[in-house]
């Protein structure tokens, strides 16, 4: 390929392995250090959020990456093996203190944890008791997952999800049935998503939307003439699809879960600061659930309780309440309201983040200026000024008459609700780096490589996923496609999955398979 691009007589010299590991790597490190320094310099004005990225590797080690978020960009700082003190609160606290010292406690607004383990939560509690200006939060993405997990324990959501899964497994396990589905329905049943946890809920929503197609398929003469229609499994699937109670339960599950799924998708598709929006966004999700159940408290109350339980125990931070109040897009809207939680959150942020009593008093007075919309606040309260400007930038442009409140608002509204999982960092190099027994020279070289590699990933991160195909392809080994039980396919017939064009249907939401051809039973083909 390289030769094809060269003119006759031209040659090209590739760098040697030593050069790649030597001056080329060092140049990349210097360039990345310069980029990281530029990001760090912005922390003085916007503050930053420490994002903890933890996981357990194949060797059962508890590993953690330290990332730092600010509006200018997210950077990778370091990695550690915390296996030896994963259950030791005091040791975990000491580790967090070292991280704070490395970053500079005066620039840190919050720490966003990836776990709700007792040890981590207790260490976080002790940390913010000692460092009053720092807040502790749990990844909003993870908290939404916990809420949806609670939903699945509410009857009949778990049961209807299991029924829907058996239906998709049955259809995708038999080429004959899948062909019938393709003839009856325009789209795939199993929905794809980069957020694996929401696939069941998206798929159930899709099944409900294709109710008529599925009923028509199981009532067709082609289905009744197939050998599968006379099997116990086939009869169960047909009866389930024609059972109105299944559809009633499925619709109820969709009404409850999809509003939260939409919040998760919203958080996942942006890298902008969300502290000023999460409070209202979750309230809107609750109101949507209430509306879906026609305001019948007996129907929606248990779902509200599941949301509130996780919100109160893990997700809620005074930063969220203050961010809601200081977000001009919401504050100057007609449906803004304030309650005790919002007022207390704002007051707490002023007291904790501002140690000087005189400045606290000034900010209290300036909040009244903002409340009534005096001076430049009035100029910035018009709809066109609010809709086209981020909350933090709005304060930079229109909050100059109240400099103390302006600085506080910018620091609060510049923070994220997402944790490190949002960035989906590749971890294999980090796992190698944290392996013992490496000689010091190789370890330093690998440490440099990890520093460059992780920061390049963060630098190139695209929250919209426009350059990522993973949202468009269903994993053929997904549990909603491949069941655990025996399959009715064998090697005895001409009809194959390739006849269904599975290998070529790779557009958005389409099922794409690579691998061996799977054949269907001879008697099944004869009845097609």
Image: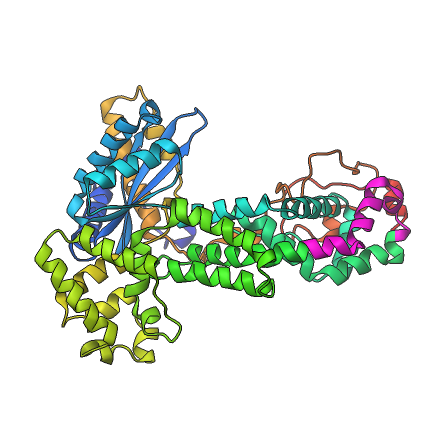
The answer to whether residue 20 is visible is: no
Q: Nearer the viewer, residue 455 or 227?
A: 227
Q: Position of residue 128 (x, y in %)?
A: 24, 41
Count the labels in the image.
0
Looking at the picture, does residue 272 appear above or below residue 194?
below
Residue 476 covered by magenta stretch: no
Q: Position of residue 424 (x, y in %)?
A: 41, 45
The boundaries of the magenta stretch are 224-249
Q: Position of residue 380 (x, y in %)?
A: 25, 77
In this picture, residue 168 sits left or right of residue 365:
right
Residue at (14%, 69%) from the top-left corner? 402
Q: Position of residue 497 (x, y in %)?
A: 73, 47
The answer to whether residue 72 is visible is: yes
Residue at (18%, 39%) from the top-left corner? 102
Residue at (50%, 63%) from the top-left corner? 287
Q: Is the magenta region chiefly helix, strand or loop? A: helix
Residue 231 covered by magenta stretch: yes
For residue 219, what is the image quadrant? bottom right
For residue 430, what is the image quadrant? top left
């Amino acid at each position: 390929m390289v030769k094809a691009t060269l003119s006759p007589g031209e040659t090209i010299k590739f760098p040697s392995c030593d050069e790649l590991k030597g001056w080329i790597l060092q140049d990349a490190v210097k360039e990345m250090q310069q980029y990281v320094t530029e990001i760090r310099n912005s922390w003085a004005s916007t503050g930053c959020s420490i994002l903890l990225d933890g996981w357990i590797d194949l060797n059962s080690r508890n590993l953690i990456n330290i990332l730092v978020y600010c509006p200018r960009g997210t950077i990778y700082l370091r990695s550690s093996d915390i296996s030896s003190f994963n259950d030791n609160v005091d040791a975990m606290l000491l580790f967090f203190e070292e991280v704070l010292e490395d970053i500079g406690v005066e620039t840190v607004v919050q720490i966003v944890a990836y776990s709700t383990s007792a040890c981590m939560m207790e260490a976080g509690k002790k940390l913010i008791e000692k460092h009053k200006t720092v807040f502790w939060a749990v990844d909003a993405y993870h908290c939404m997952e916990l809420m949806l997990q609670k939903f699945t324990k509410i009857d009949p959501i778990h049961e209807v999800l299991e029924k829907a899964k058996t239906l998709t497994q049955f259809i995708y396990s038999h080429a004959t049935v899948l062909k019938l589905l393709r003839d009856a329905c325009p789209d795939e049943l199993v929905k794809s998503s980069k957020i694996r946890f929401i696939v069941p809920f998206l798929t159930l929503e899709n099944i409900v939307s294709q109710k008529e197609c599925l009923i028509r398929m199981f009532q067709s003469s082609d289905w009744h003439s197939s050998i599968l229609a006379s099997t116990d499994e086939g009869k169960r699937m047909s009866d389930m699809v024609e059972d109105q109670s299944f559809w009633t339960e499925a619709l109820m599950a969709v009404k409850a879960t999809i509003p939260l799924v939409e919040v998760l998708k919203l958080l996942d598709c942006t890298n902008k600061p969300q502290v000023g929006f999460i409070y209202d966004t979750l309230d809107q999700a609750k109101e949507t659930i209430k509306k879906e159940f026609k305001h019948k408290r007996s129907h929606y109350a248990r779902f509200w309780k599941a949301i509130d339980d996780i919100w109160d125990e893990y997700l809620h931070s005074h930063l969220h309440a203050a961010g809601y109040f200081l977000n001009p897009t919401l504050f100057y809207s007609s449906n803004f309201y304030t309650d005790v939680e919002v007022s207390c959150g704002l007051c707490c942020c002023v007291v904790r983040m501002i140690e000087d009593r005189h400045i606290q008093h000034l900010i209290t007075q300036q909040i009244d200026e903002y409340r009534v919309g005096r001076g430049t606040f009035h100029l910035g309260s018009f709809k066109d000024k609010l809709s086209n400007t981020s909350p933090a930038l709005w304060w930079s442009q229109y909050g100059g008459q109240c400099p103390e409140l302006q600085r506080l608002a910018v620091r609060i509204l510049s923070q994220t609700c997402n944790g490190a999982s949002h960035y989906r960092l590749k971890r294999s190099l980090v796992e190698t780096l944290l392996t013992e027994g490496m000689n010091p020279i190789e370890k330093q070289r690998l440490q440099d490589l990890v520093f460059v590699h992780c920061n390049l990933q963060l630098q190139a991160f695209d929250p919209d996923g426009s350059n990522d195909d993973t949202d468009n392809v269903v994993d053929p080994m997904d549990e909603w496609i491949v069941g655990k039980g025996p399959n009715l396919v064998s090697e005895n017939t001409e009809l194959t999955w390739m006849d269904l064009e599975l290998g070529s249907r790779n557009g958005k939401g389409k099922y794409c398979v690579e691998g061996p051809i799977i054949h269907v039973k001879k008697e099944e083909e004869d009845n097609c």
